Image (spheres, rainbow, N blue to C red):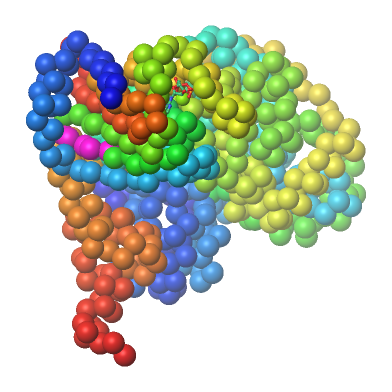
Amino acid sequence: MDKEKKYFHALQVKTEKCVACMKCVRVCPTQALRIRNGKVALDEDRCIDCGRCLSACQFGALLPWSDKLDIIKNKKYKVAVLSSSYAGQFSEHISYATAKKALLQIGFDEVIEESMVTELFGMMLHKYLQNSPEIRPVLSSSCPAVVRLIQVRFPSLLPNLLHLESPRSIVAMYYRQKLIKEKKLAAEDIGIYLIVPCIAQVTAVHQPEGKFSNLEDGAISIQNVFGEALEVLKQAVQDKRPMDIHTRGLGWAISRNAASDLEENKIKTLSVCGIPNVIEVLLKIENQQIDHYDYIVLDSCTVGCVGGVLNIENPFIAASRIRHIMNKEEAASFESQEILDMFEKGKFGVEQLEGRSIMKLSSDIKSALEKMKRIHQINAELPGLDCSACGSPTCITLAEDIVEGKSTIEDCVVLLRKKMRPKNNTK
Amino acid sequence: MAEYWYFNEAFAEEASSYFLERPEPVIVMDFTIGERDFVNAGNASSQIKMALKRLGVDHDILRRIAIASYEAEINETAHARGGEITGNIYPEFVVIKFYDKGPGMKDIEQSMVPGFSTADEQVREMGFGAGLGLPNIKKNVDVLHIDSEEGGRTLLEFMIFFRKKS
Ligand SMILES: Nc1ncnc2c1ncn2[C@@H]1O[C@H](COP(=O)(O)OP(=O)(O)OP(=O)(O)O)[C@@H](O)[C@H]1O
Ligand SMILES: [Mg+2]
């Protein structure tokens, strides 16, 4: 396999736009970005699609990628599976049902929600925890950026990941079967598209981890449908077709809500959001320096999925609107013995995930130790300011890049300046 | 000066010759620990662990190192007036030293007893003080050495091998 294309990432790098401001380099939690020869460069092995660099870049050099709305034309019967954060994007005078109907107006035949199955998911999780009492804490696998973070930085915690499809994929699997059976549709005529809040979910659809087959036909960003949905709102309001809304599970777009739902099922749960917090907690779990939890919900974005870079609205405002919808609008209930049967048959199980460790300096300890020694020696010469003017995020990463032959000590601007000044110049 | 030694049988011979010769480590990592600095307590352990992770040390061994060094670092913060931590990394093992500024231990054997603790109110409020730290260190290391007396400084050092016990 071409090494450069080993991992798909839902972001576009426009080097011609890069002004080498270093902002992206500094925010990347896995040190996947460098400025080389004045332009941004992405290390595909390290990127986890968290999207922090996209928010940092103000020059259009790093842009999100997702499927365009017109890909749905390829299929006869088109189903949108909504991320719960979609409900938080519209102002309060637009009902959630109307916001859903707007998607019917722009070409979908059906609009369903990942929030439909959160209660069932809670039951499945309960069983899963009962069946694997030796693994604690179990870590949520719904956020694909977190899954990849664990693969690259915490491979020892891979067995703790919940090896179960996420609610959105469960909905997609179930619905495809249902359409084939009840509507007598041919499998190839059905298109199931996720409407997603972040690039990690786009990547997960295009390069799934641990899935036996691709479950969805595309991932369209909330941003890519929002404009068109607004244009047809009037028609959506007049659309008199019934539209169920599953408001109870919408709260899962907000980090702590998933946890409080599960606590009702007697599952001791912790929820953590934002990559720096997630990393800190994973370190504690790795060291076994954390109180006992059965399940830990880990979300890469602030507040939860409402914080994804492909949303429109500010995450706190979106979260507030979702809470409002949950309190005010009537919830349809959704029960499905079929989904529970599918779970019992292992249909939602995923393969054991493999690490993508970026941590090891070498394949054996001896040569890694020699490398590290050189890294420390070089680091001791560097100024320790972590200014990232060299194009590497910190002094120690520059030292590593030098040892790997990717940079030279001349890249350090601070050292260069010192050298250029005469030594005993007291002026 | 009172001394305490514990050796894991499987590594006893190799370990004894190490402590006689004290060869130069390949990598030395130094840290300063502040008195009652609970905010930063654990940082030194984390950084040593990160380095070992990057060397490719096995997960289970890494976990043992992390647990032992964290407990010792907390003790240095909670029971002593801070001090220094040095991580000495060798190709086959790591030796981590915790050298604090006192007040030392009255009776090391007693301190090693599970449940024995002199932790004060503040330390207990931080969630420490069960008296299980030292026993937990012993359980996870291949060699434990403590050198301490009342009114003096305490040196605690331990050694953990990177290969599994055979
Ligand atoms: N560095 C030290 N200096 C002085 N006394 C110490 C030091 N480390 C441990 N002790 C003494 O040994 C006792 C037992 O230590 P240990 O780590 O086993 O338990 P603890 O720290 O009291 O509680 P826990 O570790 O369970 O939170 C301490 O309460 C203290 O009296
Ligand atoms: Mg202790």
Image quadrant in which the N terminus of chain B is located: top left
Quadrant of the image occupied by residue A253:
top right
**Residue placed at 45% from the left, 12% from the top?**
B114
**Would residue A351 appear left or right of B22 to someone viewing this image?**
right
- Compared to A48, does A289 lie above or below? above
Magenta residues, as a range? B87-91
- Compared to B107, does A79 lie above or below? below
Query: Which secondary structure class fits the magenta region best?
Result: strand
Q: Is residue B111 magenta?
A: no
Between B160 and A332, the one lying in front of the other is B160
Q: Is residue B88 magenta?
A: yes
Task: Name the spot of residue B8 as percent of width and height, x first.
Answer: 23, 13
Task: Name the spot of residue A361 as percent of width and height, x first.
Answer: 23, 43
Task: Kindly give the residue lying farthest to the front in the view shown.
Answer: B151
Image quadrant in which the C terminus of chain B is located: top left
**Residue placed at 72% from the left, 33% from the top?**
A257
Quadrant of the image occupied by residue B25:
top left
- Compared to B17, does A1 lie above or below? below
Between B124 and B54, the one lying in front of the other is B124
Task: Name the spot of residue A371 as percent of width and height, x first.
Answer: 17, 47
Between A361 and A123, the one lying in front of the other is A361
The picture quadrant for ligand 1 comes to top left
- Compared to A355, does A383 lie above or below? below
Residue A389 shows in this picture:
yes
Residue B63 shows in this picture:
no
**Residue placed at 29% from the left, 51% from the top?**
A4
